[in-house]
Image (tube, rainbow, N blue to C red):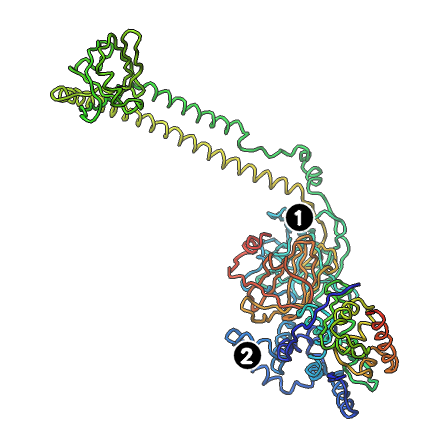
Amino acid sequence: MKRKVNINRPKLSADEINQHKNFDSVLKNSPGMGARPLLKKPWFLSGMVVVTAAIITTVLVLNKKEQQPVVAESVQTSDADSLALAAFYKAEEAKPCIAPPINGLDIPYTSFKVNAEKGAALDFKTGSKLNVPKDAFVDENGKPVKGDVELRYREFHDAADFFVSGIPMTYDSAGVRYQFESAGMMEMLAYKDGKPVNMAPGKTINVELASAYKGTEYNLYKLDTLKNNWSCLGKDKVESKYNKEIEGNGGSDPGDKKDIVKLEQTPEYKMVGLKKEEVKVEKDKQIAALPKPAPEPKKPNRVNKDKYTFNLDLDLTDFPEFAVYKNVQWELGAENEAMSNALWAELNKMVWEDATLKEGNKKGESYFLSLKKGPKQVNNLVVYPVFEGKNYEAAMKDFSAKFEKYTAALDKRKVSEKKIEEEYEAKIAALKKKQEELEAKWKKEMDQQVASMATQDKVMRIFRISSFGVYNCDNPSAYPHGVSCNATLTDERNSKLMCYEVYLVDRHKNGLFTFEKNPVTTFSFDPNSTNMLWTVENGVLYYLKPEQFDALKGGTQNVAMSRVEQQFKTVDEMKAFFNL
Amino acid sequence: MLQTSKYHATETDLASEQAVVEAAKKNPERFAALYDKYYEQIFRFIYQRVDDKEQAFDATQQTFMKAISNLPKYEFRGVPFASWLYRIASSEVNNLFRAQKAQRTVNIESVSVYHIIEEIQESKIDEYHDKIVDIISELPEDELQLIEMRFFEKRAFKEIAEILDITENNAKVKTYRILDKLKKMIK
């Protein structure tokens, strides 16, 4: 095999090489180094004497992080850095099991009052149902609770829900770490006068959790917030919502599902369209029926001495427009290109026996003149009537009178046309309004139809709970394979992000893959899937833009994350931002 | 031939280095001294065999990460700690080639080719330069490694032997056999 050969490749200087030294990164990324919490490592314990002072120093360092030059971030490890990290990890590890990562963003609870002695059947917008039996609650001393109990309930269905809730989605089974793929998760808590209450022994609440996931591969897990792990409770029961409705309410067959009809195909909408066409035809008819004004009179022209002009003894009775004129003269038009002085002299010398006039191409302006004497003929000379002296004044007077009449008629017609146009616009506006009403009505119906179809596609994941907390219909899933990255996460200004976890959203899986121990961490992803990467520093969300993720390659690298400037008030705003 | 490798160490140096290694086994942060000492050497070793500078830096980091992880398994055998690092680096580079993430490249300085030509006692230096380069670029990997270490990296046979985990005599014999092969091939 012939290899690539470089002859006399420029040598790198020692400085250039040593600039890439980063022992801190090596230490943190060395397999096995991150397995034991930093605080439990012997070398760390031996340095505890100086912890307090160093933490104070490093907290100051962290607080001033933004003002520090970027270079200073990545130069070399110091004790202060290590201790700052240790303090950071300690704080992160001390957080409660459920810790929403984004400031001010969480999945809200829906609260209900349930009479403890009577129990209740509760329906939720999501389609889920709870059936609370009577006498289901006891206080912290095990005594039955009477009166109204406040039930707080919330559901989690996708990666964004899981993320903002801060509920861990990792599952440790016999030392092997899995990530949950969820078919739906819910949390239920109960309070009496603001104090938490428990479920009475022997009582269970029936939960029907509406889910878009029909598979039977999911188990039911309950979150153990003390052990920070999930306990497997067995299988839930999957029941089609549609089947349930048949059994309970005699619902219709799914085959009866209405097809979504396009608005343009509805008879009402078609009718309005036809009406618009009719109104236009009517308008055009009305305009056409208006009296037509006489043609615009043409202004008479004076004799031009520079042009060939001549008199003719013509009978003009066939041309009423000349009735009021006397001594009309004729000017040869420039259209007679073949006319020359010689030809003109020849024509002038001749005494013609016959001359005929007919209307020319410019109506009311030009005429065709044909002359004949014996066999000699001149046909279709283009001529224009012109006037001279008093004849011109008379012609102008006649023109002014005619033009005034013409203008008056034209104005009258314009008024009539405007009135017709206004009536037409009013009719069209009314029809448009009708169309908009139909559109709104259609959209509402379609939304209902789509919602109804979506509900029919859902299943009920049915299980019984005997204590309050977080329950998850889940399937443990291995971490994605494909590309593995050792990433130092930075913000867009190349400052290292001090974050404890990175979250991978694999759009082909309904879960949230969590990778711990940042700012330097190892994470993997399936390059054939659609992925998103999130992390959080001080409650602020950072993400990797899709084009950056597409360009992500394996190995050790700096990954610049973008800060989400928008303050999400609800998880739906976050879903809209990430197009989830 | 001028040897430029920083590999060689006295017994005192070896003992001192071994103390650092033992300390690093207990506290990985103490490995920083070894990292500082060998970073440049290991990088140059890797960069000699690949085309891409960034890949070489990445592989260097990986080498030290693996070294730290496997440090508890390291046993002192009376040779510099560097020989162990070179073996990890060599394995890391081979992994890159196997995964087709990097292209095996032979980086040659002309002066090194002239040394080879001198070594095989040929006088037509300019005439044989290109031929030698062509032949070297197609040598089997184990032979190329010996030529690279001996002539391009200017390592002593003792060091080559320790890196390749063979005897010094074996390193010499193998190298001269390759030179003999080159001599026959250029004619």
Q: Is residue B136 left or right of residue A449?
A: right
Q: Position of residue A505 (x, y in %)?
A: 65, 57
Quadrant hosting residue A72: bottom right
**B184 left or right of A227 in image:** right
Provide the secondary structure element on which disc 2 rests.
Answer: helix
The amino acid type of the residue labelled 1 equals: Ala
Chain at tag 1: A
Residue type pointed to by label 2: Val
Q: Which of the 4 quarters of the picture holds residue A520?
A: bottom right
| Chain containing the residue with disc 2 | A
Residue at x 37%, y 23% (from the top left corner):
A283
Q: Position of residue A456 (x, y in %)?
A: 66, 41
Which residue is drawn at the image coordinates 30% and 21% (left, top)?
Answer: A362
| Residue at figure coordinates x 45%, y 32% from the top left | A434
From this view, report whether residue A305 is shown above or below residue A161.
above
Residue A189 shows in the view: no
Q: Residues within 10 Å of mark 1 (few under 14, many from 20)?
A: many
**Is the residue A231 above or below the residue A424 in the image?**
below
Quadrant of the rendered structure where residue A13 is? Answer: bottom right
Q: What residue sits right under mark 1 in the picture?
A: A210
| SS under mark 1 | strand
Rendered location of residue A180, percent (x, y): 71, 58
Asked if badge 1 and badge 2 are on a common chain, one would say yes
Mark in front: 1 vs 2: 2
Q: Nearer the viewer, residue B185 or A385?
A: B185
Whether residue A167 is visible? yes
The structure residue drawn at horizontal position 61% and vertical position 48%, both measured from the top left corner, is A124
Q: Which residue is mark 2?
A: A61
Question: On the rendered image, what quadrant is the N terminus of chain A found in?
Answer: bottom right
